[in-house]
Structures are given as structure tokens and as C-alpha cells.
Image (tube, rainbow, N blue to C red):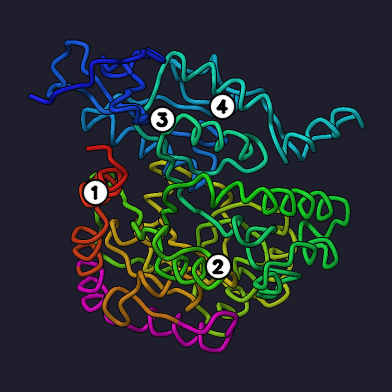
């Protein structure tokens, strides 16, 4: 039995696993926050996770992982809570009363509203206040944040640091080192800000080629870096690809602060179909940096049918390009759920012709889960997910000719060989990218931060 000092001054009591916090004086030496059990049996306690993200619905890959991560830990016996932004499409949450007001920066609004939104990008007092209210109801052992930029802002991080709550953030993009997220300017890879400069984003109009938006993001970045608000208040930065880990270290982040944890896929949600179809499928946004134009040109050369799934602001441009080149390309619009899975199952392969530093595209893992191979550009984290001529093929990003060659290979390969590769792809994802492996990795990370 541990001997406690004779003098204990109670500082605060919160409904956290029936533990009361005391400041302990022992031989005139102040001990910071000794935990004293108030009578509960802590062997049966549940750990508490607070998940934070801008959106509380499946808007994109980061939002999907945020929801899946939270659900995974709840299924593992943890108590979980969520903090996000109000939105008509939100999933239900018993903590929605604490969410911040909806902000959509692309909508038309008056000057006063624009000014208010601009200030929230830099530092949202509303998010900080609402989180303080949530902590009165749910006090977590650990916080896992995802995309908090702009809508929630990093204003919440110092609050969590002051409360002594460990904070982990998953980097789904390069926002913490590149003001414009992508390391991309006017369609070209850009690393001008590697030396810590923040104003390149304004001078080169990196954000939607807009001076005003780029200026705002430049100011935001300058203030956040002056405050050192991310590096100082985050305990760990999770990256889903080794490529991202290297970039963050190269750009000045401490290697000790970075943890590589690959994404996972709910493989039981996908029934594999190893019989090859007669087309290659692309799934994604119809914008230039995804390599859609390169794919259309390659399809025209290879005479290989390509089904393009998705929408985007360059859709009409790509449709005209396919028509002009007489490319065997079919645009089927946005698909999701069973309709999307069926398109993949009936395909010959999935193609990912990206021209930006991708992180760790879950679309590759989902293709493997369906028993399909992947043709991927050798950029960013994509090469980490493809075993050459085993689960798929790589080609130099932006190379129309080489991509055309890969499309021909997939077209001409015997169905039996392609089917065997699809089986290998399914085994590959079953062995390395399951939710069980992800859960173990995250629990190990949380344990490093004192949550066991």
C-alpha cells in the first residue's frame, strides 16, 4: 500500500473514471496532480476517447477514417465522444449540442460574414468555448484529431494541452507544412516553403489561384507558426504512409513525434470477384491533379475501355477531350455503396493516375478487397501499396506513353493470370491492412502516451 502525504489539498473533481485530482504536498515539495482513487474499482474502468474532425459525415476519406476510428474503439469497449461542426448531413451524435456552427467557405456571403469566417480560420473562439463545455460532460483520457483546419481551427489544442490530455492528430494532407495542403502550384509539384517561408502561398496564388484566399491562408500560416500552435500542443502526429513521414521530417518535424500507422479497410464489406471484366475503372474527382487528362490520352492510344466514376469542376473539359481524341471512355458520374463496388467487381483493374503527392489512398485497398489489381502512378505514397506485377503496376506520373503500355498489358493479359493477381491482392490487404492491425497499432500508440 502506498503511503500518501499527510496534507492533501483538493483542487478539482471531474467525472473521469471515478478519480479525483489532488495537489500533493510532501516535505514541502509540490507534486503535480497525483491521482487518488475515490473508491471505484479501476480494473473495470473504460478508457475514454474524444474524436475531433471538421465534418461528422462521410464527405471524404479523412472524414470516413475519423468515423471508422471512433466506431472501432467504441466496439473495442472504449467510451467515445465526438466534436465537430454542425451540418445537415451529419451522422447522429449525443454530443452534437457542443458542435460549432456550420461554416461553408465556398458559399456567397456578405462582407461582415466573410470577415467573421476569416477570423475563425485563424483562431475559433467558438470552437474553444464549445470544447470547454463538452469537457464538462465528457473528460477524455486521450484526444484523436483529424482535419481541424479552418472550421474548428487549432484554437482547441492549447486548451487540451493545459488540461493535460494527450492529443494525437492524423495528417491526411500536408497542411501542417504546406499552407496550400498539396505541395502543388499551377499543376506542378512545389516545395518552395521547405525553408519555413510562409508567403510563397500568397505570391504564387497557391489557393485556387486566388490572391485574396491565398493571402488569408498566408496570414493564417504565419500566425500559427509564430505561435508554434501545432508542434507545441500535439503529442503525436500519425501518418498513414512512410512517404509522408519522410516529408514531415525533411520539412522540420521531429522524427520522435511522428508515428506511421497505415490505413485500414473493412474487408468484410467487400466480396471479391476474381473474374476480369472488359474495362479499367477510375474512381475520384475530375480535376487536373488527379491525372484524368493523362488517363484519357493513354486510353485513346491503347484503345482500352475506361469507365470514369466521379464528378468535378473539370468534368466538361475531360468529356470534350475524350470526344476529340475518340477515346473509349465512359463517364458514369458519382457512384457510392453497392453500385460503386459492383463497378469495381466487374472491372479488369483499377487505375490511379495521380499527379500529386498522394498519402495512402484507401481506394487501392478497396480495389484489392474486391479482388482487383491496380495501375498506379509512382508518386507520393502510392508505390508503398503496389507490389509490381503481383498486385498491380506502377508507371511514371504524367507519362501518357507508359500508362498506355500498362493499359495494354492489362487488356492483353490472360484472364487466368489477372485472376491470380487479384487473389494475391486480396491476400495482401487481408494480411496488412485490417482493422484489427490498425486497432493494435493505435492502442500501442495511446499506451506510449500513458493510456492503457
Q: Label 4 near label 2: C-beta < 8 Å?
A: no
Disc 1 to disc 2, C-alpha distance: 25 Å
Q: Earlier in the sequence, mark 1 or mark 2?
A: 2
Q: Earlier in the sequence, mark 3 or mark 1?
A: 3
Q: Residues within 10 Å of mark 1 (few under 14, many from 20)?
A: some
Say whether residue 103 is visible. yes
Discs 1/4, front: 1
Disc 3 to disc 4, C-alpha distance: 21 Å
Quarter that holds the C terminus? top left
Which residue matches tag 4? 89
Q: Label 1 near label 3: C-beta < 8 Å?
A: no
Magenta stretch: dominant secondary structure = helix
Per the rendering, the mark at residue 444 is: 1
Q: Label 4 near label 1: C-beta < 8 Å?
A: no
Quarter that holds the N terminus? top left
Residue 403, placed above or below residue 430: below
Amino acid at each position: 500500500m502506498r503511503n500518501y502525504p499527510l496534507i492533501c489539498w483538493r483542487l478539482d473533481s471531474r467525472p473521469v473514471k471515478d478519480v479525483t485530482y489532488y495537489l500533493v504536498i510532501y516535505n514541502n515539495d509540490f507534486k503535480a496532480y497525483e491521482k487518488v482513487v475515490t473508491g471505484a474499482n479501476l480494473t473495470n474502468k473504460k478508457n475514454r476517447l474524444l474524436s475531433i474532425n471538421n465534418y461528422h459525415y462521410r464527405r471524404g476519406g479523412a472524414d470516413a477514417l475519423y468515423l471508422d476510428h471512433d466506431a472501432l474503439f467504441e466496439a473495442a469497449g472504449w467510451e467515445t465522444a465526438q466534436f465537430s461542426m454542425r451540418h445537415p448531413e451529419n451522422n447522429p451524435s449525443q454530443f452534437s449540442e457542443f458542435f460549432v456552427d456550420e461554416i461553408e467557405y465556398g458559399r456567397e456571403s456578405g462582407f461582415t460574414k466573410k470577415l467573421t469566417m476569416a477570423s475563425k480560420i485563424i483562431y475559433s473562439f467558438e470552437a474553444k468555448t464549445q470544447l470547454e463545455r463538452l469537457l464538462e460532460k465528457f473528460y477524455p483520457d486521450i484526444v484523436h484529431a483529424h482535419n481541424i483546419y479552418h472550421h474548428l481551427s487549432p484554437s482547441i489544442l492549447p486548451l487540451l494541452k493545459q488540461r493535460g490530455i494527450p492529443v494525437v492528430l492524423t495528417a491526411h494532407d500536408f497542411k501542417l507544412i504546406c499552407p496550400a495542403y498539396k505541395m502543388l502550384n499551377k499543376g506542378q509539384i512545389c516545395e518552395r516553403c521547405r525553408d519555413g517561408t510562409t508567403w510563397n502561398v500568397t505570391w504564387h496564388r497557391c489557393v485556387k489561384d486566388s490572391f485574396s484566399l491565398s493571402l488569408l491562408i498566408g496570414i493564417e500560416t504565419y500566425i500559427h507558426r509564430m505561435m508554434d500552435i501545432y508542434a507545441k500542443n500535439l503529442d503525436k502526429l500519425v501518418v498513414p504512409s512512410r512517404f509522408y513521414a519522410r516529408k514531415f521530417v525533411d520539412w522540420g518535424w521531429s522524427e520522435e513525434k511522428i508515428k506511421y500507422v497505415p490505413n485500414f479497410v473493412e474487408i468484410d464489406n467487400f466480396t471479391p470477384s476474381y473474374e476480369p471484366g472488359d474495362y479499367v475503372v477510375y474512381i475520384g474527382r475530375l480535376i487536373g491533379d488527379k491525372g484524368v487528362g493523362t488517363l484519357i490520352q493513354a486510353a485513346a492510344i491503347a484503345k482500352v475501355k475506361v469507365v470514369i466514376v466521379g464528378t468535378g469542376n473539370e468534368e466538361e473539359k475531360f468529356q470534350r477531350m475524350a470526344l476529340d481524341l475518340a477515346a473509349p471512355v465512359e463517364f458514369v458520374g458519382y457512384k457510392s455503396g453497392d453500385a460503386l463496388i459492383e463497378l469495381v467487381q466487374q472491372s479488369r483493374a483499377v487505375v490511379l493516375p495521380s499527379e500529386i503527392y498522394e498519402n495512402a489512398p484507401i481506394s487501392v485497398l478497396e480495389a484489392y478487397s474486391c479482388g482487383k489489381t491496380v495501375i498506379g502512378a509512382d508518386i507520393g505514397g502510392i508505390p508503398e501499396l503496389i507490389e509490381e506485377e503481383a498486385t498491380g503496376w506502377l508507371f511514371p506520373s504524367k507519362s501518357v506513353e507508359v500508362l498506355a503500355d500498362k493499359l495494354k498489358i492489362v487488356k492483353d493479359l490472360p484472364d487466368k493470370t489477372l485472376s491470380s493477381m487479384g487473389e494475391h491482392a486480396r491476400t495482401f490487404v487481408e494480411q496488412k491492412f485490417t482493422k484489427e492491425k490498425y486497432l493494435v497499432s493505435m492502442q500501442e500508440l495511446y499506451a506510449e502516451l500513458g493510456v492503457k
